[in-house]
Image: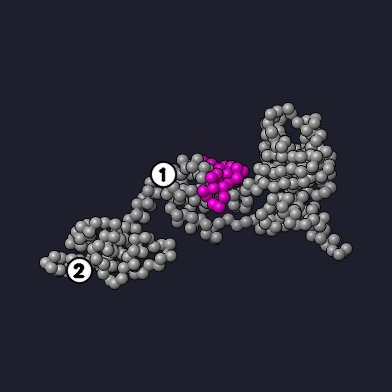
């Protein structure tokens, strides 16, 4: 049996076997390979535990150990270790206690290529908590049953699937789950498919005017103007502080960005006036540094912002939410002929492909514009 040096399945001991030439090994060589004493190897040869050929030298008996015998021994030891590992995993009767460890590992970037954002971890934790209300263990059978609960909800299926795959990776790190679980669960035939036709929504220019007109106070107007003129994410707006915005220069700094990719942004004069009016007349006096606060004088949350925008949209007789204003930002500026790379940088997208996917321009608008090309 030969072992390749770069074979990931080859152990250090197995590679040592192939480093010795010939079909037989001396007792000293076997002792070096197996990490045992020469006396122990000699006893194994005498008892037949290792297949060896005795040779008489000067009245003493020496043994030539068959290389295949050493390889069989190593394979047996590997199988024994695997059996112990599986037995340990079988002994795990409840995967729920691993939740806190998983969250810390995910936050520290030990699962996947980078640390999970707070929003992603919250979404994953919610799905796992709901899963553990029904089950105690992460098993392929349980995951399959849970996915069957949402046959017509591709987005929910994908989110739960990503959460449980993340949790399973941590369990494997802790030797609390068989690695074969991932092989089955991550098979492309089993993994939930992306929704080929996701529901997409963008706030049109007419609806944007209606939304601004429906603002009941300076706070509402400042929020809508910032979201519409910068294309920032809801979480980014909630994380803005007073130090992040310069009204005189019409610039701001996004610090709490996705994947920690801070970026500068500019905004128009109308937005500067709206924010200045809010700061002068409506922002509560508080030591908190955040630009926007809720009615309890605490940092505005993403859910609170979502509800606020939806209330304004309802008053305006339209359908809108923060992310739809982000899509509007991309669609409007690409339609106006702005540099796609500038729009990409403004949105904080790592790829121009992502920016293009945000473009919700209607086909008929494209056709009409072509008449003047």
SS category of the residue bearing label 2: strand
Q: Are marks 1 and 2 in contact (CB under 8 Å)?
A: no
Question: Is residue 318 among what the camera can see?
Answer: no
Q: Tell me where residue 307 sits by quadrant.
A: top right
Magenta segment includes 157: no
Q: CA distance from mark 1 to mark 2?
A: 48 Å
Question: Is residue 203 among what the camera can see?
Answer: yes
- Give 140 or 222, whichever is nearer the viewer: 222
Quadrant where the C terminus is found in the figure: bottom right
SS category of the residue bearing label 1: loop
235 horizontally vs 251: left or right:
left
Residue 218 is tagged as none
Residue projecting furthest to the right: 372
Residue 93 is tagged as 1
Count how many numbered circles sit on residues in the image.
Answer: 2
Residue projecting furthest to the front: 58
Residue projecting furthest to the top: 285
Task: Write down the residue under mark 2.
Answer: 53
Residue at left 70%, top 44%? 254
Magenta segment includes 131: yes
Q: Residue 59: where, in percent of width, then height?
A: 11, 67
Q: Residue 252: where, in percent of width, then height?
A: 74, 43
Residue at left 31%, top 58%? 77
Residue projecting furthest to the bottom: 22
Q: Nearer the viewer, mark 1 or mark 2?
A: 2
Magenta residues, start to end: 107-133
Q: Residue 251: where, in percent of width, then height?
A: 76, 43
Q: Residue 162: where, in percent of width, then height?
A: 56, 51
Q: Residues within 10 Å of mark 1 (few under 14, many from 20)?
A: few
Q: Earlier in the sequence, mark 1 or mark 2?
A: 2
Residue at left 80%, top 39%? 248
Residue at left 71%, top 43%? 253
């Amino acid at each position: 049996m030969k072992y390749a040096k770069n074979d990931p399945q080859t152990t250090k001991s197995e590679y040592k076997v192939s480093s010795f030439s010939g079909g037989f090994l001396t007792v000293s060589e076997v002792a070096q390979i197996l990490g045992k004493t020469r006396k122990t190897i000699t006893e194994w040869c005498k008892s037949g535990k290792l297949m060896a050929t005795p040779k008489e030298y000067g009245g003493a008996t020496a043994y030539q150990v068959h290389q295949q015998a050493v390889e069989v021994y190593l394979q047996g030891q590997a199988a024994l270790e695997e059996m112990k590992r599986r037995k340990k995993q079988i002994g795990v009767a409840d995967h729920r206690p691993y939740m806190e460890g998983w969250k810390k590992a995910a936050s520290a970037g030990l699962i996947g290529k980078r640390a999970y954002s707070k929003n992603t971890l919250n979404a994953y934790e919610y799905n796992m908590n709901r899963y553990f209300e029904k089950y105690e263990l992460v098993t392929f059978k349980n995951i399959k049953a849970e996915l069957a609960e949402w046959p017509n909800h591709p987005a929910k299926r994908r989110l739960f699937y990503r959460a449980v795959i993340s949790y399973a990776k941590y369990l494997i790190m802790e030797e609390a789950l068989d690695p074969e679980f991932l092989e089955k669960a991550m098979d492309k035939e089993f993994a939930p498919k992306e929704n080929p036709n996701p529901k997409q929504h963008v706030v049109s220019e007419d609806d944007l005017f209606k939304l601004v007109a429906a603002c009941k106070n300076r706070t509402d107007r400042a929020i809508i103007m910032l979201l519409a003129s910068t294309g920032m994410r809801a979480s980014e707006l909630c994380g803005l502080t007073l130090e992040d915005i310069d009204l005189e220069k019409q610039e701001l700094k996004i610090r709490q960005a996705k994947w920690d990719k801070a970026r500068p942004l500019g905004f128009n004069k109308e937005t500067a006036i709206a924010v200045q009016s809010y700061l002068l007349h409506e922002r509560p006096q508080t030591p908190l540094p955040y630009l926007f606060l809720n009615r309890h004088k605490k940092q505005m949350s993403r859910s609170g912002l979502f509800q606020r925008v939806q209330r304004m949209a309802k008053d305006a007789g339209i359908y809108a939410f923060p992310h739809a204003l982000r899509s509007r930002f991309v669609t409007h500026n690409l339609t106006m002929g702005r540099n796609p790379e500038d729009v990409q940088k403004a949105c904080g997208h790592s790829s121009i492909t992502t920016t293009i996917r945000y473009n919700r321009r209607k086909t008929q608008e494209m056709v009409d514009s072509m008449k003047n090309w």
